[in-house]
Amino acid sequence: MKISLHNIRAARQNWSLEADATFTEGLHLVSGDVGSGKSTLALLMAQQTDPLEGNIHREDIHSMMLSFQFPEYHVTGLTIADECESWGLEPDTILPSLGLNLRKDDSPLSLSRGELKRFHLTCVLAKEYDLLLLDEPFSSLDCYQKTCLRTQLETRSHGITVIFSHEQAILPRVSHIWEIETGKLIDCGTPPDALMQWHHIPKIIRNLIKSGKVPKNISPEDLEEAACRTRE
């Protein structure tokens, strides 16, 4: 199971993005500055837009989901219960865990941005996809909900999951790190070696490395273990 980007290129006005990469099974992180092209890359990988050059090849990928940063884009139901059912899920199973069982007849758009994001991600993660693309999944969530999402992502064992994010504080253990810099997708590699190549590395990880304590991965638990470790 893999998705290969063969010398693809996207562009508009003075901006461009190039990628030549293969994503295999596991949890991937794509980082980059705001406006660097993370969302565009997600759209390209989902084949919701076509590259100007190159092509994208999928192997053994039969189901796909692209989750946009803003959950409003996904709303199709008139009520929260309708929205839940539109994902093929039972409201009585999903809504109580979110504290929304008494609001099932309300409009999804009556929820706060954080509530709607949490509801949307719960629906997304309730199913398995061969290719799951998550554009800024941590946005609009508080620290507790970010931690819950991180745990859910770490427990996914099926398919290819790609997180496109500039989140710096609460991240899951990942199998591969990529970043977009100067208009190109760069393969940093697998942790911990990838941390040495990662220009968008969070400050706390950079400081740990400078002190001679290289984390094994990028989750808070990995950072805590490194911080408490005697110097290597």
Image (tube, rainbow, N blue to C red):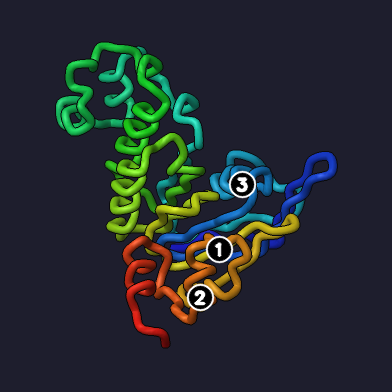
Q: Earlier in the sequence, mark 2 or mark 1?
A: 1
Q: Which one is in front, 206 or 33?
A: 206
Give SS at disc 3.
helix
Give SS at disc 2.
helix
Q: Residue at x 39, y 32 (%)?
A: 117
96 to the left or right of 207: left
Q: Please state the horizontal and vertical placement of residue 69, each as a whole percent of the image.
A: 50, 36
* Residue type highlighted by circle 2: Ile
Quarter-of-image position of residue 47: top right
Q: Please state the horizontal and vertical placement of residue 225, each as a whole percent of the image.
A: 32, 72
Rendered image: mark on residue 141: none
Task: Give how far apart the Cα atoms at labels 2 and 1 are.
Answer: 11 Å
Q: Please state the horizontal and vertical placement of residue 82, each as a whole percent of the image.
A: 29, 18
Q: Nearer the viewer, mark 3 or mark 2?
A: 2
Q: Residue at x 73, y 48 (%)?
A: 10
Q: Crowding near pointer 3: few (<14 within 10 Å), some, many (20+)?
A: some
* Residue type highlighted by circle 1: Ile
Task: Give how far apart the Cα atoms at labels 3 and 1 are.
Answer: 25 Å
Q: Earlier in the sequence, mark 3 or mark 1?
A: 3
Quarter-of-image position of residue 25: bottom left
Q: Which residue is mark 1?
A: 201
Identify the image quadrant of the C terminus: bottom left
Give SS at disc 1.
loop
Quarter-of-image position of residue 75: top left
Q: Residue furthest bottom?
A: 232
Q: Residue at x 24, y 31 (%)?
A: 89
Rendered image: mark on residue 209: 2
Identify the image quadrant of the N terminus: bottom left
